[in-house]
Amino acid sequence: MSFSRRDALHILVSGAVSTAVFTFFKVSGAKAVPRPPGALIEAEFLKYCTRCYQCIDVCPTNALVPAGITDGIPNFGTPVLDWKKCIFCMECIRTCPTGAIKKISRDDIKIGNAVINRTTCLTWSGQSKCDICYDACRYDAITLENEIYPVVLDDLCTGCNVCERRCPTDPKSIVVNYEKVKRFLPPDKRVAMRLEDQTGKRHGEEDFKSWFVERIKKLGRSYGVMKEEEEEE
Ligand code: SF4
Ligand code: SF4
Ligand code: SF4
């Protein structure tokens, strides 16, 4: 059996294209993106999430946006969290119809840990007596050492970011570090889905076309290619 130069070229080009495609999928599958509070461990999250966009639609602060193609094929269309915008309102947790976001309580959320910079903190640096972060924390995750100096209790801190938002210094003297994220195991039984949950279509919406148009507008706004006023037209 002999190869012509044309056959050899064909094999070479096919090999190069296959390698490029394989590498692309492998790399694209490896990208880790931040998930909503309550999200299952990543491999399970990707299995359970149907890209219905209901969590994205319900989020009041636009903390969730759909992953784009540059986030990798497996992630495409799944919700990506902007940590700083999340207010722990629980709406995405309540809304997710598939169990990809687990029905946990607010106290079970953990997306990070607050860290105090003692050099700039008003109290620690001796500039003035401040306990704003202590008062702001609803999880009792800040204690006052010697009844004066704020200290974060890592086990109780959820990463809710309220202390950071309230801290009066610029730059902030208490900042949430988003490395210790708690993820969850899937439920024992998979949730049976209704058709409207699979498509993201809600009760009361007239037809698939209007749902789809709304979806495109939302995507356009998320990625900055459509302005609010264009959306209203
Ligand atoms: S908890 Fe609320 S603010 Fe945070 S991602 Fe979910 S819907 Fe958005
Ligand atoms: S991030 Fe939230 S839970 Fe953690 S210390 Fe700050 S206010 Fe408390
Ligand atoms: S709010 Fe900021 S300045 Fe005030 S005690 Fe907390 S970390 Fe220090």
Image (spheres, rainbow, N blue to C red):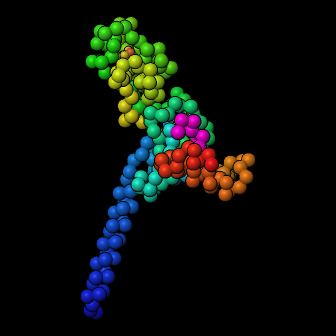
Residue 208 picture quarter: bottom right
Give the residue displayed 31% in from the left and 21% down from the top: 117
Identify the image quadrant of residue 91.
Answer: top right
Magenta stretch holds residue 58: yes
The quadrant of the image that shows the N terminus is bottom left
Front residue of 94 and 208: 208
Res 52 seen here: no
Q: Position of residue 185 (x, y in %)?
A: 50, 42
Is residue 47 something that shows in the picture?
yes
Relative to 143, does residue 11 appear above or below in the rendering?
A: below
| Front residue of 8 and 60 | 60
What is the number of callouts on the image?
0
Q: Is residue 169 left or right of residue 43?
A: left
Q: Is residue 17 above or below residue 77?
A: below
Position of 154 compared to 211: left or right? left
Q: Which residues are magenta?
A: 54-62
- 105 drawn magenta: no
Q: Position of residue 14 (x, y in %)?
A: 34, 76
144 or 44: which is nearer to us?
A: 144
What's the residue at 37%, 31% (across, down)? 177
Residue at image x 60%, y 40%? Answer: 58
Toward which corner of the image does residue 126 lie, by quadrant?
top left
> Percent x, y for residue 48?
54, 50
Tell me if 120 is positioned left or right of 192 in this view. Answer: left
Q: Is residue 79 above or below residue 155?
A: below
